[in-house]
Amino acid sequence: MILITGSSGQLGSYLVESIPNSIGLDRKESQYTKIIWDIRKEIDSALRDYEIDTIIHAAAQVSVLKSVEDPKIDAENNIIGTINLLEYARKHDVKYFIYISSAAVYGEPRYLPIDEAHLTAPKSPYGLSKLTGERYALLYHELYGLKVASVRPFNIFSPRQDPNSPYSGVISIFVDRAKKGEPLIIYGDGEQTRDFVNVEDVVQLIKLLQKDKPTGIYNCGTEKETSINELAKIIKNISGKDLEIVHLPPREGDIRRSYASIEKARSIGYKPTTNLKRDIERYFFTRNKKGGV
Ligand code: UD2
């Protein structure tokens, strides 16, 4: 059986939906979650009734902002929580561990596109805790032979991101404001770029990993960069409204340009399908907002 942690979250919910023989664990209830459990506590008693051979660890404190406000809670979830799962894997002879890391581990890019060999110099407690969790997982490979893959997603988007959360991504926020006819707010000149990847591509890569079970680190993106100005234009056009675009001072610590090298993911068969305009339309502006995988 495949354990998916973070099953009430954006990525975890899609994973439960699209991976057969999987079971979801999360501290929050949802239709995708079978086991309600906080990973900051040891995990054995929660999984007593199950035989787990693979763990996909997507549960995390995901907000950069929150991690700055409360680095301790961030570390408890992302570091201690990961250690609890790795300890379970070690004791119960789990065969494969997929760790969901983040592009935040790189910090300010030194060159583009960013490949997996790029220096890791996180700029936030979140980036550091995700990197530490990843290092622990890879250490368990060294020490105990646990097969471990770490996925470093760039900017994931899907209709399951809560636009009302102050920690939400720019696409959900822009779409929400566009629907309400509110101005789109761009921090800085809008020429900063990101590699936006739809959640289905992240699921695609994870399924490929599950098939071959390699050990290693894999970026997950599209190898394309889109500026925030372009993104605002796309969403304004789709909405068909005469939306105002307002520029505010840049966000502190904002990265200027970012996009992934995905050569390594390609080597195991990954082919990104993300098409920003089409996906924003079908995820957010059609009647069926499910955006099913
Ligand atoms: C993303 C991830 C973060 C971490 C990081 C790694 C999300 C929500 N955050 O942060 O968890 O992995 O990548 O580098 O996926 N912006 C606006 N107006 C808005 C909101 C945002 O102009 O209303 C800009 C923002 O200043 C930034 C860009 O849009 O330049 C993307 O912002 P974001 O918060 O979606 O994601 P990012 O890249 O800061």
Image (cartoon, grey):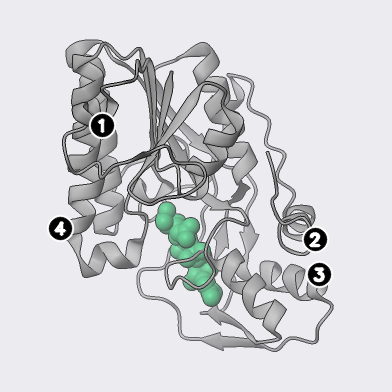
Give coordinates of residue 11: x percent, y percent: 51, 44
Q: Amino acid at mark 2?
A: Arg
Q: In the rendered image, which residue does mark 3 sit on?
A: 238
Calculate the distance from the C-alpha at mark 3 to the C-alpha at mark 4.
Answer: 41 Å
The residue lying furthest to the right in this view is: 240
Q: In the rendered image, which residue does mark 4 sit on?
A: 72
Give coordinates of residue 20: x percent, y percent: 57, 23
User: Which is more toward the observer, 279 or 27?
Assistant: 27
Query: SS of the residue at dot 2?
Result: loop
Q: Does 249 appear above or below 79?
A: below
Calculate the distance from the C-alpha at mark 2 to the C-alpha at mark 1.
Answer: 38 Å
Task: Decide: few, some or many residues near mark 1? Use Cα within 10 Å; few <14, some 14-19, many ≥20.
Answer: some
Q: Nearer the viewer, mark 2 or mark 1?
A: 1
Calculate the distance from the C-alpha at mark 2 to the C-alpha at mark 4.
Answer: 41 Å
What number is the disc on residue 46?
1
Task: Decide: few, some or many residues near mark 4? Use Cα within 10 Å; few <14, some 14-19, many ≥20.
Answer: few
